[in-house]
Image: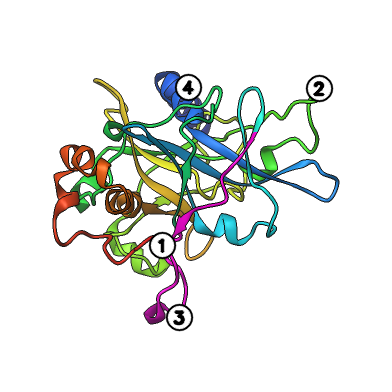
Amino acid sequence: MKGSMTDETSAAVAFAVNERIRETVKSLVDATAPLYQPDRRRQPSLIGSGVFLQVANERFLLTAAHVFDSAAPDVAISVATVSRITNLPGFRWRTSGSPTDGGVDRHDMAIVPLDPKEAYYGCRFLALDEIDPFQETEEEVASPAAYLVVGYPRTAQARQLTDGKLVPVACPFINRALPFSKYAQFNVEPASHLVVGYNRRDFFGISQEQRHPRGMSGGGIWRLDNLWSGQLSARLVAIVCEYHERPESAIVGTRVTSPILAIREKYEALRSVIDEHFPAASADETPAERARLR
């Protein structure tokens, strides 16, 4: 009976949280892009996820650099929107491996500048006040704030078109950030990364079924403030870059500091807008200065 009560309580809590975040999740799914390439049968095959961002009149897609590394060369990568499939521009900036880290690209971040005239029907672009690019303190990470991860797992996608249409399926889930003391076991630092728990045997989220997160690379990690009471808010803090099963199940994200600094550096007209939202961006030393996007 005790186990039954625990199960009932857990189900009630899950239902209450899902109802509270439902509209927020829908809004964030609309800002998260499924990325495709055609397979050998010329059917769209999911290769990753991305997050739409708008700074003034400029639009961008943030994603993980390895999504492009794993893609077929010289084949267009597309975004599935409500009404059609739109090819991404071929130009992008990305981080690269560090000689001091054996050539491994720990930051694994890419930015695709988008054509402002291209209509991404049904997609939503995040504004600067919806992101938080600078490092949280350990106290904030340990606070009651939860983290929402949104992406498109490959195992959740249909193997063929439905009535001639592509119907992407996102699988959002909620969990806590791991303490900073555990970051070293994933070879990352709190200044540049965020590590969130992901236990497929103890899954908690809007989705009814837990999925292997392959395909969620490039998706977003949002911090949910006031999850239990008050005004719920969600801010993008990182982009998914890795999944680990050992030493414990976790998803690693690169903080969005580096793309914000890259946009500020490359778009002189946007600097005042970025500095107004994030005064730390104009400082000489910032946590992501080591993660240059080229």
Report the side of 67 relative to 285 (left or right): right
How far apart are the two marked residues, 3 and 4, measured between alpha carbons?
Answer: 46 Å
Q: Amino acid at mark 4?
A: Phe
Please name which of the two marks, 3 or 4, marks the residue nearer to the observer: 3
How far apart are the two marked residues, 2 and 1, measured between alpha carbons?
Answer: 41 Å
Q: Residue at x 80, y 41 (%)?
A: 43
Please name which of the two marks, 2 or 1, marks the residue nearer to the observer: 1
Q: Earlier in the sequence, mark 1 or mark 3?
A: 3
Q: Which label belongs to residue 15?
A: 4
* SS of the residue under disc 2: loop
Please say whether residue 102 is one of the residues in the magenta stretch. Answer: yes
> Disc 1 designates what residue?
294
Above or below, comparing residue 253 to residue 36 in the picture: below
Q: Residues within 10 Å of mark 1 (few under 14, many from 20)?
A: few
Measured as percent of width and height from the top left, residue 186 is found at 42, 66
Q: Amino acid at mark 2?
A: Asp
Q: Which label belongs to residue 163?
A: 2
Q: Nearer the viewer, residue 246 or 219?
A: 219
Residue stretch rendered in magenta on the structure: 86-108
* SS of the residue under disc 1: loop
Measured as percent of width and height from the top left, residue 67 is found at 57, 55
Tell me if residue 243 can be seen: no
Q: Earlier in the sequence, mark 1 or mark 4?
A: 4
Please say whether residue 215 is one of the residues in the magenta stretch. Answer: no
